[in-house]
Amino acid sequence: MQSGDPIAKHFRLAPAQAAALRKLGLVTIRDLLYHFPARYEAQGSETSTRELVTGAKVTLYGTLSKLKAKKLWKSRRAVTEGWFEDATGRVKCMWFNQPYIASYVSDGSFVRLSGTVGGSEKNQCIANPEFEVVPRGSVPTGLFEKIPTHKSGPRQVVGAENFVIPVYPESRGITSLWFYHAIRRVCENGAHKTTKDPVPENVRKKYHLPDLSTALVYIHTPEKNEHAEAARKRFAFEEIFIMQTARAQERALNDSQMPFQISDGNSHVERFLESISFPPTSAQSRAIADILKDFSGGHPMARLLEGDVGSGKTLVAASIAYAVVHSRPKGRSSGTLQVAYMARNYAERTRNDAEKWREQVTSISRAQLLKWVENGEIAMVVGTHALIQKSVKFQNLALAIVDEQHRFGVGQRKALIRRTNAEQTRNNAEDIDPLLYRDLTYRIRSALFAVKKELGGGHKESVYQKSVAQEFERARLPFSQEVRIPITYRNKSVGTYIPDFVVDDKVIVELKAIPFVGQTEKKQLWNYLKGSAYRLALLVNFGPRELTIERVVYDSARSSAFVPRGSASVPHFLSMTATPIPRTLALTLYGDLDISVLDELPPGRAKVTTRIIKKENRGEAYESVRRELAMGRQAFVVCPRIEEPDPEKMNALQAKSAKAEAKRLQKDVFPEFKVGLLHGAMSAKEKDGVMREFASGKIHCLVATSVVEVGINVPNATVMMIEGAERFGLAQLHQLRGRIMRSSHPPHCFLLPETFGQVSSKRLKALEKNDDGFKLAETDLETRGAGDLLGRRQWGISDIGMEALKNPRLIQAAREEAFALVHENPRLEEYPELAARAARVFTAMHSE
């Protein structure tokens, strides 16, 4: 049994079980090993059937027999029944929806069985007990002897003191018990030892982490709680370390690119700021200075601008966009530099701000605009997902701004950056297929490192050629040393290139034995690829100290893929988010970006008053809203999001809740005002129509789901009522509250919880007393966890990884080790398992 084998190869699966495994994303034995317990349950006190007490949690040793699967007559529900027996008596056992147990366990098997005693005192049973087949020698001494009668009662039985039972996440059709037995069988067959450890040995030793095979045993079959804790610590570190490694590689790739040169950025920004009627805050000035410094660096900017609601991110973005479109770099004659601003509901505001720019600014909405963009006639384009369509091409895209990045996926961000002219796209290293011939290149690299380990450095190139040929033969890698590639000049042959090796008729391997490999060698090899039918070459250098392996890729379909850094320019990138994120979380999720924080609000903003309203005080809150509406102000009423696996059902439930509240408010509470409705099930056209009416003042009170969380700007709205406030995270509540913080009139936020437990009370009181989004985010991280702060499934992070985000020391350690490793070995040739896992990170991390 190997970790890469399909689960179905080694386990007989019923259709329902196979479907459940697919739903859980479990395909291979490795997936099964990484399906960790959600919790552990301590075994009950070891006793005998004679001493059973209804409601008690017990552990019994004895035989399991007469197992039979059947279906209940009325419900047709599957149930397996059997009898557990020891020296003192027997008790009935039942398992619901687990018919496989009847054929899984041999009649009369010796087992350790744990569960809660149910039924009446005279007719006891144990439903859905956990059990494990054990050898008789593992049974505590004397347990199956007859219990002597004595005045003092039965003697105490001593067994395993700290044994814990893992409880796994389930899905309809498959149970925790199935996982328990399946994973135990996997470990007994040694499959857990066939999975390569992605965490380097020196890192494990430094932080006292168990190796992978040990950690898998610890987490699935712990003998005591300390084992499970050590394993969870190791897997938490592993997940964050791999994520940080991917971020470090992403940053290294960014820093290897050639940026667009932005000239006279400072003077352009000063001119823009002089044209507005208010000075920037100190935080805005610092952020602008950070960005201008990035512009003068030797690589494209990659920065996250993090600011609370109303902190002025738009001003920062507008000022640097102004600087870019007015820049005229020396030596560039192809026209104005362009800016792509990917945002929601900012087109109108940006167009108004840009009247002073003396440049064309437009919003993508019609096909005829695409040609203007491609020709460079439009300097700045504002749009949403339309900007990443393949039909949108830019002539000189020098700056890409993405507002609320966590709502646009990593792949979408890359697609936006790639939307530049044909020459740029051709030379963009982001077009590499990093997994091209992955398995083959791993085998080649293993052979090369074996030669390096045996010979060391300092030999002639011919020595390495002979040794590599022998190692390829030993590794059974098919290769040729006779392939001839013509070298042409103006369509005429001027020579022939014979690579050192062509492996499996797919990969060229070129050997060097020089102090270092530079761009000249890479460019030369790329040109050789261009004249051949091959896509991939490995440039291998047996240097004096180390072995380096460079991937060089040529894609005839795109004319290029990997070209050494040259004339191609990559746009600067600025991401903005109004979601306050704790530093540990930001370093993990945006680890490839530098971070600027706007930690102060512009002067003159009225402070919001937030109050928790109990059910008996609702009338008072409604009167406050009525007074605001009577003065010509407007109000939001937000209904909670109702979670449902089916997205269509979720939207329907959201709409029903919002509709009912809107109808009630219009009829019973605010009949003299117009109440509008906005929810996720509405079409884009319907939503826009409602928002236009609300912005114009035709709608006085807008009832909505949390679709109003981001991008809604109605300064006349001064009241926010949030129904079921305990269902929202603090960050989301703060975002909702931010919709009324743009007004110059005193804003009011009313929190109307349906329940008021201890945890929700603490969170809502924190919101009531605090208007600092970053402090609230820290509170949310502590009380609800990172999964609830940003969306558990949104980033592809497991529950263990989410828990790790509460540990700043672990995050910092994983980040430092990952960046140091990538700095020394950017392509991770010596760590193929880590390289493969890091390459998969971006497919797992996506956004809604």
Image: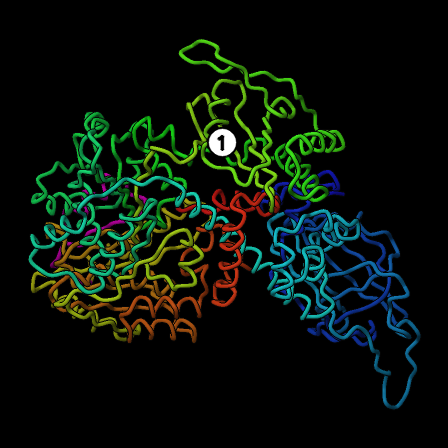
Q: Is residue 65 left or right of residue 542?
A: right
Choose top left, top right, bottom left or bottom right for residue 413.
top left
Residue 686 among magenta residues: yes
Residue 346 visible at all: yes
Q: Residue 165 magenta-drawn? A: no
For label 1, the residue is 521
| Closest to the observer, 684 or 258 | 258
Which of 404/783 is in front? Answer: 404
Pick the front one: 28 or 116: 28
* Up-down relation of residue 783 to residue 801 (above or below): below
Residue 639 visible in the displayed image: no
Stretch of the chain drawn in magenta = 669-694
Q: Position of residue 21 (x, y in %)?
A: 62, 44
**Tally of numbered tags:** 1
x%, y% of residue 74?
65, 49
Residue at (59, 41) in percent of width and height: 543
Residue 507 image point, x, y percent? 59, 27
The residue that appears at 16% across and 61% down in the rendered structure is: 742
Identified by mark 1, the residue type is Glu
